[in-house]
Image (tube, rainbow, N blue to C red):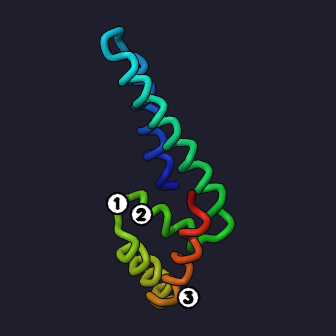
Amino acid sequence: MECIPYLEDLRLEVETLKLVRTENNKDEIDYKIEEKENLIKKCKENLDNLSSNQIYYRLYLYMLDGLTPSKAIEKVASENYSNDIKPNSFNGVWNYYKKMKKILK
């Protein structure tokens, strides 16, 4: 799973922030730690919601990887076309993206 390294990086960031926390900027560090922990939780929840459909899951992972929604849709459509999987058009995968946006928090 390509998202595991991303989640692991976030977890490491949290641990690092906890280690460098000082009295002078304790509140700021605590805020950043909480922010990263919430992001990890949100990503895990989204992956859990999307795991029942491979197209949703791949779109989400490509967007986590930094692709724009349009580029992620193009990539999934191209992969589907290469593997003879339906939907294999941009518009077909776009419909999945529109539904996926409603699932994501």
Disc 3: which residue = 87
- 1 or 3: tag closer to the N-terminus: 1
Q: CA distance from mark 1 to mark 2?
A: 5 Å
* Tag 1–tag 3 contact (CB < 8 Å): no
Q: Considering only vertical position in the picture, is 98 above or below 22?
A: below
Disc 1: which residue = 66
Viewer-side residue, 103 vs 49: 103
* Tag 1–tag 2 contact (CB < 8 Å): yes
* Amino acid type of the residue that numbered disc 2 sits on in the rendered structure: Met
Report the side of 102 relative to 94 (left or right).
right
Q: Name the residue: 65% across, 60% down.
A: 49
Residue 102 lies in what quarter of the image?
bottom right
SS of the residue at dot 1?
loop
Disc 2: which residue = 63
Q: Residues within 10 Å of mark 1 (few under 14, many from 20)?
A: few
* Amino acid type of the residue that numbered disc 3 sits on in the rendered structure: Pro
